[in-house]
């Protein structure tokens, strides 16, 4: 049986489809015991567009993510009672993108007592669009990766979240879509610093299995870095499919469990009211 899916999106996110009720029903069909809804809440576009006085750089840059979060919290709360009756632990989460855009604001948002779970993610460098939107034939890829891990380290030191989302996210597009190999050895010390900060803050990482069903073909992170995280004292690990539709719920999680065990993990966890609940990996 799959242990959990703690990274999922519905149509409340601008790039997702479906409803909370529909996702819960699919989780029930799959026999999935734990489901966290973690809609995108981009902290560099948290307020309405007028607050920033800038135009979106592409069709994906929507503003007023405060409204997205509120919509999600209310929608998940409305389904929790039915989920319990169906034997499903349904969690109110969020994927907090770019918390380093405003750590004070991000800390305030993270304090919402309705939240069970927070993934911190870095989808874009503060001065650039999402990695999804960049032209890697013209970008300086080593400079991008160095900046990515540097900003990620700032987020790990800040620490007002539960797990770090999809470590090595840029590779989804640089290697997977553009087909450009990116050796990670030059950034290993930065990755170590991130893991050290997470362990010191009692924070974790997710094993994001979305790469298995994408051109990239690998999870985020891969076995090598799961092992490194474990060796550096990392204990908190969640699994997430990063599904953006009900049909993708749970995909790759079984492979992720096998990978985690190969990396030396005997337990994974999910979060209720921001507290970890550990499960033995069978």
Image (tube, grey):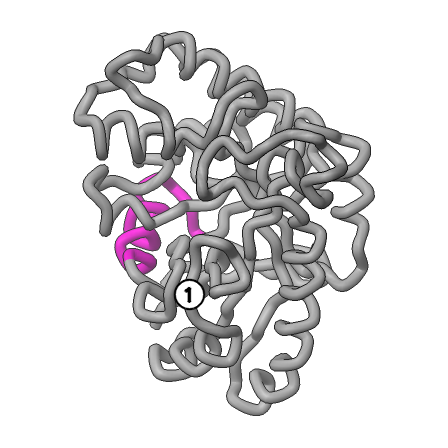
Q: x, y (%) of residue 107?
A: 78, 39
Q: x, y (%) of residue 19?
A: 49, 74
Residue 252 in view of the camera: yes
Q: Residue at 28% x, 56% y: name it.
A: 252
| Residue 177 vertical placement versus 210 (above, below) | above
Label 1 Cα crowd, 10 Å radius (few <14 / some 14-19 / many 20+): some
Magenta extent = 252-267
Query: Which one is nearer the viewer's eye here, 103 or 65?
Result: 65
| Residue 232 vertical placement versus 93 (above, below) | above
Q: x, y (%) of residue 86?
A: 52, 89
Label 1 residue SS: loop
Q: Residue at 68% x, 40% y: name it.
A: 49
The quarter of the image holding the C terminus is bottom left
Horizontal side, residue 107 vs residue 269: left or right: right
Horizontal side, residue 172 vs residue 190: left or right: left
Q: Is residue 261 magenta?
A: yes
Q: Main secondary structure of the magenta part?
A: helix
Total numbered labels: 1
Query: Which one is nearer the viewer's eye here, 260 or 124?
Result: 124
Q: x, y (%) of residue 212?
A: 24, 48
The quarter of the image holding the N terminus is bottom left
| Residue 280 vertical placement versus 164 (above, below) | below
Residue 192 in view of the camera: no
| Residue 97 vertical placement versus 18 (above, below) | above
Q: Residue at 66% x, 65% y: name it.
A: 71
Q: Residue at 65% x, 39% y: name it.
A: 45
Q: In the picture, residue 176 is in which quadrant?
A: top left
Q: Residue furthest bottom?
A: 85
Q: Is residue 219 magenta?
A: no
Circle 1 sits on which residue?
17
């Amino acid at each position: 049986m799959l242990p959990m899916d703690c990274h999922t999106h519905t149509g409340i996110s601008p790039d997702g489809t479906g409803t909370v009720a529909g996702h819960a029903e699919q989780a029930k069909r799959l026999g999935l015991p734990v489901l966290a809804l973690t809609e995108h809440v981009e902290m560099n576009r948290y307020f309405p567009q007028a607050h920033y006085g800038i135009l979106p750089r592409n069709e994906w840059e929507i503003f007023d993510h405060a409204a997205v979060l509120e919509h999600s919290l209310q929608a998940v709360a409305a389904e929790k009672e039915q989920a319990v009756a169906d034997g499903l632990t349904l969690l109110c989460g969020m994927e907090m993108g770019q918390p380093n855009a405003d750590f004070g604001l991000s800390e305030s948002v993270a304090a919402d007592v309705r939240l069970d779970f927070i993934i911190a993610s870095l989808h874009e460098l503060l001065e650039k669009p999402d990695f999804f939107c960049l032209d890697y034939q013209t970008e300086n890829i080593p400079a991008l990766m160095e900046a990515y891990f540097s900003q990620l380290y700032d987020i790990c030191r800040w620490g007002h979240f539960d797990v770090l989302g999809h470590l090595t996210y840029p590779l989804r597009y640089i290697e997977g879509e553009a087909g450009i190999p990116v050796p990670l050895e030059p950034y290993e010390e930065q990755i170590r610093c991130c893991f050290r900060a997470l362990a010191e803050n009692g924070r974790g990482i997710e094993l994001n299995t979305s790469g298995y069903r994408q051109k990239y073909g690998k999870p985020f992170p891969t076995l090598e870095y799961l092992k490194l995280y474990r060796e550096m004292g990392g204990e908190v690990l969640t699994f997430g499919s990063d599904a953006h539709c009900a049909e993708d719920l749970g995909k790759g999680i079984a492979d992720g469990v096998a990978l985690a065990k190969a990396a030396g993990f005997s337990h994974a966890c999910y979060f209720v009211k921001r507290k970890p609940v550990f499960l033995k990996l069978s």
